[in-house]
Each structure stands twice: as structure tokens, then as C-alpha cells.
């Protein structure tokens, strides 16, 4: 009996050290979900991968969270690390109180110093973290934050000049470039880039020249502070989070364990779903037909417009710098076939402002439903079928050949690069490999390159020899300000996924930004921006994503329907006993 008691005490102590609640090993209420790819790192300051949203949401904390309304028909902001909603001091100054109960999973306190350190590192001009803009200039613009981040080694902007200050141990102050609403301030501090980092581990992993840190590369180099503790990371296979008994708002969360499988192949996901081993499933083009009439199926519009980046600097493609070449490629895509047949039940889109853009504006009028958004669609369709016109494609290709002095009989081979798990883009590439030689009368051929274990952005950093790169970047701010969906394609955005920039496009984006407070005028200017985008082919829009999802009968959702800007709130769900 003494040996058994000692063993129990040892186990209890071990669980305490790991910040894992007793009983977690038994599972309790387990939510079972999946990711299509794993996270390269858990450092939310320096990873553009959307796969990181899941572990950061569950195992990280933010100043604010969005939570479902009691009636399940909407959502509101509440303090997470913050003790209360931000307090407006004057037109441009906000103070945010920190909850004294906030702490890391090991019990270390989270206070004003934690947040100041985290934000200073996120904006550090030497580290050049790729998510810095999400703090500096997202739903609000913080004074001198972007200038500090982008100064390099010049030292012209001091940290003291940035509009982020410590007032006392449990209060920070934010100064913005103009007046914003309380909601906008809250929304700035809900995205994953603004989750705090654990200073001892961040510094322990810092390189001697302070240009990088190993923070988040392993679980030993990462610290949880959210409602769950990240306990198992079997890369490319499994992530497991268990309830954090030190989290100060634990009443909002109901799962004991979150079991995340990394499942790249849709067939494997379907098998897990059919065996009852997943609580949600998003069918793809090859499986949606099977489930389209399933009563568990729900659908909702997305922020995503699937598109293709075009390389303007491929040394092996003599056409790459010609805008007429870009126009030829724009008109060569049969979006009806790609969106409906290959991607499956998606909407063809030869334009880029998404269907949710503007839905959270004061009027609730989306850009696509406005006269300005409709005018763009009508203009495109007046000369083509959702941007598809083989005749125009050939005309522009002939002009491109003239632009660069290519002989009319020259055959150009293009390369489309995509991840080895992107099945819809693989099928699209195979389709275009057959179509392009026909449309362009043998002058254009297409070959496919695949990569694994890296993002599209990282792939494009590794080589210049590519022509097409499928992508699906989204920007939540576009739900309020539609034009901001183009933000990632500005030259001023440090992690831009493209390499084609146009002064007219950049100038018109600035015009949209200048009329942000006049929604009608902003919609009008957004129309001009989108028309420049299409004419100059900043990249090629392909399809508006319509999301389809099924949930298991055992999963109890906290909302009655999909809520734009919030979703289904599965993190707040429960498991039926």
C-alpha cells in the first residue's frame, strides 16, 4: 500500500509539473478534429501558415476573444488576458487592463511586461517576424509600429516612439493613428500573431545576432497559456491538447481533450469520419457529391477566393515580365469547369473581393452585393464567360510575344507549382496541361512541380523557376473594409506572396484607405481598385470558396448557424454524453 501511495504521489507531482490536470489521460470529453497539414513551428509571430490557427486558439491566449452570445445567434468580445474591454482615454488613446489571474501553464504570471515584451519582439526590426503587420496595421494602425518594424538597422525610430506603452504592472496603453471604435480595438488583439510569447524560452532560443529564435520549434521550446495545454506533437501525425487547470476562464470551454489528427488525404479523412473517429469533416470535390444531401451538411460563404500567383521574374520564361502575358493567362482559365467540376460546388470568380467583404460594415451591405461590385462582374462578363475567352487569351499572347520580341513559332513551357497534398490544384493542373496547348495552338505548354513540407511562400523563396503558384490568402479585416483583401499583394507588405507590383494599384489602395470612414465612397474606390487588379492581373482569381462542413451528432455547437467573423465556434462546443 505504501508503494502504491508513493506511486500515486509521484504521478500527481508529475502531472502538476506538466500543468496537466489529473484525469486528462482518461480523455473525458474528447473533441476529435483534423488538420490538412501540420505547423512548421508554433511561433505565431513568424509563421504565415493557417494551420497554426488551431493550436494557438486552443493553447494560446490573447487580450480579447470572440465568444458566442447566449442565444447562439451572434458573438461578442470579452477579455481573455485583458480584465475588461479597452477604455478610451481620448480620440486615439486606449488603455487595456490585464487580468491579474492570467498566467502561463507553469503558473508564471502574465502582466503588462509580458505583453510589452511580446509586442516588441513581434515588431522587432532585426527579427523581421512575418506576422508583424497583424499588430502594426490590421483593424487599427498603431502609431509608428510599422515604421519601427520596417526600419531595419537604421535605428531612426525608437521603441519609445511606438504607440504601445506600459502604464503599470497590469495596464498597457495603445495609441492609434486616428480614432477607432472599441470593437476595432478588440478585434486587433484577437488574431494569433498577438498571442504572448514566453520570454525565458524566446530568449533561450535567440541567435547571437538576434535575427532568429528557435521558440516554438518543439514543445520544449514553447509554453501554453490558453484554455488547453499542448501535450503531444507527433509531427505530421497527431496534436493533442488537454485542459489547462491554470486557465482563468475555463468555464467557457467544455472539452477535456482536443485530439487533432494530421490527415493530408481526403480519402483518409472520410474513412475516419465514417468510422466515427472525427467530429467534423469538410468534403472536397471528390467526396462532396456523396454528402451533399446529408442532413448534417451545412454550407456558408468564405473569405477565400482561390487564385494563382504569377511569377513576373522567371529567368527561364521570356514572357514573364509582360502584362499582356498575364492577361492571356487570365482569359485562358475556364473557371466554370475548375470551380464547379474540379473544386466541386464552388463559385467561379474572375474577380477577387470575396463574398463576405463588407458584411460587418455598419450597413451590412457586402461589396459584391453593391452596385460597384456588381458593375465589375458585369464588365468582366460583357467580354467573357466568368473571365474565360480563348479568343482574348490568344490575342493577348500574340501581343506578349511582340512585347518581348519572341518569334511567333516559339513554344514556351510554363511551370505550375503546388503542394503534394493539394488535390484540387493537382487536378486543375492536369486539366490545364491538356487545355493550354489547345487554347494557345501549341505555343504554350504546362508542366507541374510539387513540393512537400513547406508553404507556397517558402517554396517561392527557394527558387525563381516557377510560373504559377496556387494560393488562398484571406484577410478578416475585409469583412469591414472590403478593399483590404488586397493588402497582401502590396509591395509594402513584408511577407507578400507575389512578386508583381503596380504603382497604379498601390496608389488606388491608398485612396481606398483614405476614405475608410465613408463606406459608400470606399465601395466606389474599391471598384476602381478591383478593376486595376483585373486589368493588370496582379494575380489570377479562380473561384470563390463556398465552405461545406458536417458535424457529428455527438458534437454540440454553441451557435444556431454560421456567423461571419466568428464561424461555428467549435472551440466552445461540447460533447453530448
Image (cartoon, helix red, strand yellow):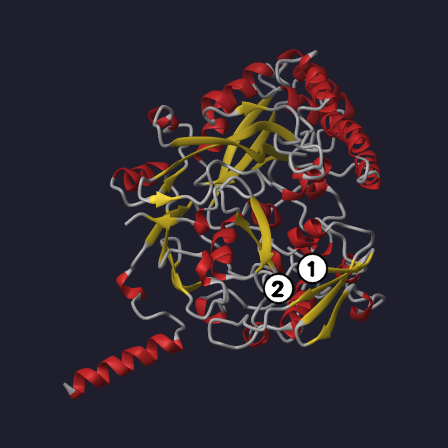
Q: Is residue 46 visible?
A: no
Identity of the residue drawn at 70% across and 67% down: 120
Q: Secondary structure at mark 1?
A: loop
Q: Secondary structure at mark 2?
A: loop
Q: Is residue 467 above or below residue 412?
A: below
Towards the viewer: 58 or 493? 58
Q: Is residue 124 above or below residue 516?
A: below
Towards the viewer: 271 or 370? 370
x%, y% of residue 223?
A: 49, 69
Identity of the residue drawn at 45% across and 28% down: 427
Identity of the residue drawn at 31% across and 44% down: 554
x%, y% of residue 177?
A: 82, 54
Left or right: where 87 falls relative to 48: right
Q: Is residue 85 above or below residue 467?
A: below
Question: Which disc, if any, is residue 86?
Answer: 1
Question: Which disc, if any, is residue 128?
Answer: none
In the current view of this chain or complex, which residue is farthest to the front? 71
x%, y% of residue 102?
A: 55, 70
Left or right: where 537 falls relative to 564: right
Q: Name the residue that disc number 2 marks.
A: 82
Number of labels in the image equals 2
Amino acid at each position: 500500500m505504501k508503494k502504491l501511495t508513493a506511486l500515486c504521489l509521484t504521478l500527481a507531482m508529475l502531472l502538476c509539473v506538466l500543468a496537466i490536470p489529473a484525469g486528462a489521460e482518461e480523455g473525458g470529453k474528447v473533441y476529435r478534429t483534423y488538420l490538412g497539414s501540420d505547423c512548421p513551428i508554433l511561433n505565431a509571430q513568424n509563421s504565415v501558415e493557417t494551420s497554426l490557427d488551431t493550436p494557438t486558439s486552443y493553447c494560446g491566449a490573447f487580450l480579447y476573444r470572440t465568444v458566442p452570445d447566449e442565444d447562439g445567434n451572434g458573438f461578442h468580445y470579452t477579455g481573455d488576458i485583458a480584465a475588461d474591454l479597452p477604455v478610451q482615454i481620448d480620440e486615439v488613446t486606449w488603455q487595456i487592463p490585464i487580468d491579474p489571474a492570467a498566467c502561463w501553464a507553469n503558473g508564471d504570471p502574465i502582466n503588462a511586461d509580458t505583453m510589452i515584451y511580446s509586442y516588441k519582439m513581434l515588431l522587432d526590426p532585426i527579427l523581421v517576424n512575418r506576422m508583424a503587420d497583424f499588430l502594426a496595421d490590421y483593424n487599427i494602425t498603431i502609431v509608428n509600429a510599422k515604421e519601427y518594424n520596417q526600419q531595419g538597422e537604421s535605428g531612426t525610430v525608437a521603441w519609445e516612439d511606438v504607440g504601445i506603452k506600459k502604464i503599470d504592472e497590469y495596464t498597457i496603453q495603445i495609441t492609434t493613428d486616428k480614432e477607432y471604435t472599441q470593437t476595432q480595438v478588440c478585434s486587433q488583439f484577437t488574431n494569433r500573431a498577438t498571442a504572448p510569447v514566453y520570454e525565458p524560452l524566446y530568449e533561450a532560443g535567440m541567435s547571437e545576432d538576434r535575427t532568429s529564435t528557435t521558440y516554438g520549434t518543439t514543445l520544449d521550446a514553447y509554453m501554453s497559456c490558453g484554455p488547453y495545454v499542448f501535450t503531444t506533437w507527433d509531427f505530421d501525425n497527431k496534436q493533442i491538447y488537454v485542459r489547462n487547470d491554470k486557465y482563468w476562464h475555463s468555464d467557457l470551454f467544455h472539452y477535456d481533450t482536443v485530439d487533432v489528427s494530421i490527415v493530408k488525404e481526403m480519402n483518409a479523412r472520410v474513412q475516419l469520419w465514417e468510422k466515427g473517429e472525427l467530429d467534423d469533416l469538410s468534403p472536397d470535390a471528390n467526396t462532396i457529391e456523396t454528402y451533399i444531401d446529408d442532413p448534417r451538411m451545412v454550407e456558408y460563404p468564405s473569405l477565400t477566393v482561390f487564385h494563382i500567383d504569377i511569377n513576373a521574374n522567371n529567368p527561364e520564361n521570356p514572357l514573364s515580365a509582360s502584362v499582356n502575358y498575364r492577361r492571356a493567362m487570365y482569359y485562358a482559365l475556364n473557371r466554370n469547369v475548375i470551380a464547379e467540376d474540379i473544386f466541386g460546388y464552388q463559385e467561379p470568380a474572375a474577380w477577387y473581393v470575396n463574398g463576405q467583404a463588407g458584411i460587418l460594415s455598419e450597413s451590412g451591405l457586402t461589396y459584391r452585393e453593391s452596385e460597384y461590385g456588381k458593375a465589375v462582374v458585369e464588365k468582366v462578363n460583357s467580354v467573357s464567360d466568368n473571365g474565360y475567352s480563348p479568343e482574348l487569351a490568344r490575342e493577348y499572347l500574340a501581343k506578349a510575344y511582340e512585347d518581348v520580341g519572341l518569334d511567333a513559332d516559339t513554344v514556351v513551357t510554363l511551370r505550375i507549382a503546388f503542394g503534394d497534398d493539394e488535390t484540387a490544384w493537382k487536378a486543375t493542373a492536369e486539366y490545364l496541361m491538356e487545355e493550354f496547348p489547345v487554347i494557345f495552338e501549341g505555343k504554350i505548354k504546362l508542366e507541374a512541380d510539387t513540393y512537400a513540407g513547406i508553404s507556397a511562400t517558402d517554396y517561392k523563396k527557394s527558387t525563381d523557376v516557377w510560373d504559377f503558384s496556387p494560393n488562398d490568402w484571406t484577410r478578416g479585416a475585409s469583412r469591414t473594409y472590403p478593399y483590404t483583401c488586397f493588402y497582401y499583394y502590396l509591395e509594402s507588405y513584408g511577407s507578400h506572396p507575389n512578386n508583381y507590383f503596380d504603382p497604379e494599384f498601390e496608389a488606388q489602395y491608398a485612396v481606398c484607405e483614405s476614405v475608410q470612414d465613408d463606406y459608400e465612397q470606399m465601395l466606389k474606390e474599391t471598384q476602381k481598385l478591383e478593376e486595376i487588379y483585373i486589368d493588370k492581373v496582379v494575380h489570377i482569381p479562380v473561384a470563390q470558396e463556398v465552405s461545406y462542413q458536417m458535424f457529428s451528432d455527438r458534437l454540440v455547437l454553441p451557435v444556431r448557424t454560421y456567423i461571419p467573423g466568428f464561424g461555428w465556434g467549435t472551440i466552445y462546443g461540447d460533447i453530448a454524453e
